[in-house]
Amino acid sequence: MSRTLGPRPEHRAEAELRPLYKAHYRFQFLSAGFRSGLFTLLAAHPGLTRAEIAKRLEMDEQPTRVLLLGCTVAGLVSKDGDGYFITAISEPLAADVTDLPGAFVPFEHHLTYRAMSWFYESLKENTNVGLRRELPGDADTLYGRLAGHAELETTFHHMMGSVSRSVAADLARKLDLSGCRHLLDVGGGTAVNAIALARRWPHLEITIADLPTVVEAAGARIAEAGLESRVRAVGLDVFNDELPGGCDGVIFAHFLEIWSVDRNRMLLAKAARALEGGARVFILTPVQDDDETGPELAAYLSAYFQTIASGEGMVYTAGEYEQWLAEAGFDPAGRFYVGGLGDILVSGVRRTTAS
Ligand SMILES: C[S@@+](CC[C@H](N)C(=O)[O-])C[C@H]1O[C@@H](n2cnc3c(N)ncnc32)[C@H](O)[C@@H]1O
């Protein structure tokens, strides 16, 4: 009698949809592998057996077997004989957890995973139901609520800092600030962009404007970089306060996509009021394709803004930004890609007389 089962039968429609409706399992394999230290362990000790892994992770052997099966199926570990190995996909996860792509795992696990299950309700009610249901607090946005959750705020800024670092070096290389004396960095976060730009342009002063709880962390980063004489951070709410004066350039980096069309128009009008003719405004942002068919990251981010971050933003097209710039009194002055995540930089020059 044959001991093989022959070809495995397959329900085609089920198999095609499965990666979508089982996607949450794949994330749990990734997250548990990451949190348990499995990837770091296998990077340091390739070829460990299941029993050795169980002992090192301080887990019983059967749950370890469940974890290893999941991680193997997800391509996060490979098995050769009795030994387990890290793969090209999981190898970066054995490195610094505050850097890309590792910083995304705790961010997705602690901040977005449960909240995203309210996606449909967030669409129907046109607000961020996910945030309201999953993160205690009174503020309407994730950023406001994070102020009451220090650990989560750190997790968020590790993720955001890792994204910013991955584009900041390219931004500093490509953005010509030779004609700018004092740049205002609205929603500048923990100063990753400001530090890269200040290092590239030694004449440049930068003022970061962000929420008061974030300004403290920004100040520490600026001091670490030894840039206190040229870079400072001020606490404000950009929707309730006017922008600080005395600047001849404004940058909105990873900021406008958080907000609605109306608020973006209002923010660009505010920037126009703070600037004189000839001054420049810069928008660093992910973008949606003009034909609204992608890319994938734009779809994820848009769902995140709707369900969690603000309940009102999404990833817009480059053309929309240029239209809002023109309406606010800026002449669009070009666009180019920055970094490797599909961000673009759109610039505008303040018209001398607003029209
Ligand atoms: C997505 S992060 C971008 C950080 C930084 N610009 C970057 O590119 O890495 C958005 C930032 O906007 C800040 N923010 C949110 N709401 C704000 C408000 N009403 N006024 C000022 N800053 C705000 C957040 O604290 C956060 O640092």
Image (spheres, rainbow, N blue to C red):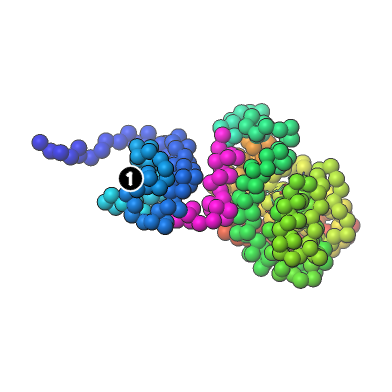
Q: Tag 1: residue type?
A: Ala
Compared across the picture, whether 12 is left or right of 327 comes to: left
Above/below status of 281 relative to 203: above
Compared across the picture, whether 34 is left or right of 303 comes to: left
Compared across the picture, whether 65 is left or right of 128 comes to: left
- Kindly identify the residue that appears in the image at 84 percent across and 42 percent down: 240
Visible residue check, residue 293:
no
Q: Residue 20, located in which quarter of the rendered image?
A: top left
**Front residue of this view, candidates 347 and 254:** 254
Q: Residue 59, located in which quarter of the rendered image?
A: top left
**Front residue of this view, candidates 83 and 348:** 83
Query: How far across and down, in percent of the image, does residue 90 sit?
Result: 44, 52
- Kindly identify the residue that appears in the image at 61 percent across and 44 percent down: 301
Residue span colored magenta: 89-114
Q: Residue 110, located in which quarter of the rendered image?
A: top right
Query: How far across and down, in percent of the image, does residue 254 sit?
Result: 68, 51
Does 111 appear in magenta?
yes
The residue tagged 1 is 51
Quadrant into which the N terminus falls: top left
Specify few, some or many for label 1: CA neighbours under 10 Å numbering under 14, 14-19, or 20 or more.
Answer: some
**Front residue of this view, candidates 340 and 54:** 54
Query: How far across and down, in percent of the image, does residue 229 sit?
Result: 81, 65
- Kindly identify the residue that appears in the image at 64 percent across and 64 percent down: 169
Visible residue check, residue 272:
yes
Query: How far across and down, in percent of the image, does residue 117 sit?
Result: 56, 32
- Kindly identify the residue that appears in the image at 62 percent across and 51 percent down: 158
